[in-house]
Image: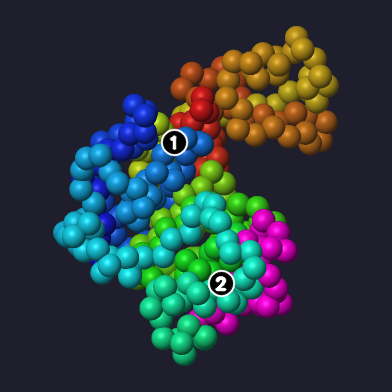
Amino acid sequence: MQIELQKVNKEYANVVAIDNMSATFTEGIYGILGANGAGKTTLLNLLTDNTRRDAGAILLDGKEILDLGIHYRRQIGYMPQQQGFYNQMTAASFLYYIAELKELRKSDARAQIDDLLNVTNLTPFRNKRIAGFSGGMRQRLLLAQALLGDPQILFLDEPTAGLDPKERIRIRNYISSISQGKIIFLATHIVSDIELIASQIMILKKGRIIHFGSHGELTNALRGKVKDYEFDADEIDDANSSYSQFRKEYRMSNVFVGNGLLHVRLVGDNLPKGGMQVSDHITLEDVYLYYLGDE
């Protein structure tokens, strides 16, 4: 299974949201990173045919998805960043409604809904009206509906937004566990959501792919561009200290106080003298700051 973008372009009111984008995706989890307005949601809307592109082609196994029509839509599951609910429905009735739209057999729908309510930790609330759900509960319900029908292609837009750390880990691990044989697009600005599970990471900036590769490829590309420094802890409140100057002039990816010292990590092409070069513990947050720190 393969999805291919060929010179895809999309503009809104003369603002380029997706700029002549070409890429190929095979089975695996693709983390899509970018600041707000980078084009993440627009890209997912184009891939799901919820938004018409201005130019270019999107192919599934060599066939245009517009020509495949319902055959394509039957293979996909989509979790939008935001969606209006029928608040009078319960969690279970909403999922049964979505199952009917997806043309699932009732016996299959029943088993899948029971499983997905359990996975998303909503079983105790299955007969509660959505009107009383918190933002995190609604988010989990959105994920459950996307997974109905066991789609081969999943589009997840900020799937863990609003969830507490425990739920985020639970959902993240579940997405990883079902990824075999699927193409999963996971758009987020929460770096930790994809650092451990994404097979490939795509960084978007102003509608363009500025870096696309594995976690190792992205972090290795930053060798020589990350250094750790130490200052006296008292410098944190001193406007004339070296730390304060660093904060004004360089990109800081991490700052913490320990053992009476202020530990600072800088990311960039031209870092100041001193410090300790980082080579083995470069993180995806460092990568994000390096490419998108000015966003």
Residue, x 46% and y 22% (percent of image)? Answer: 269
Residue 22 falls in image quadrant: top left
Q: Which of marks 1 and 2 is in front?
A: 2
Residue in view at x 26 percent, y 57 percent: 3
- Magenta stretch, residue numbers: 112-138
Residue topped by disc 2: 94
Q: Mark 2 belongs to which amino acid?
A: Phe
Quadrant holding the N terminus:
bottom left
Q: How far apart are marks 1 and 2 (CA)?
A: 32 Å
Residue 253 visible? The answer is yes
Whether residue 118 appears in magenta in the rendering, the answer is yes
Q: Mark 1 points at which residue?
A: 38
Q: Residue at x 39, y 50 (%)?
A: 44
Residue type at mark 1: give it: Ala
What is the number of the mark on residue 168? Answer: none
Picture colour scheme: rainbow
- Percent x, y for residue 76? 36, 65
Residue 232 point in image, percent of width and height: 78, 23
Residue 8: image location, x then y, percent: 25, 42
Identify the residue at the far top of this view: 240
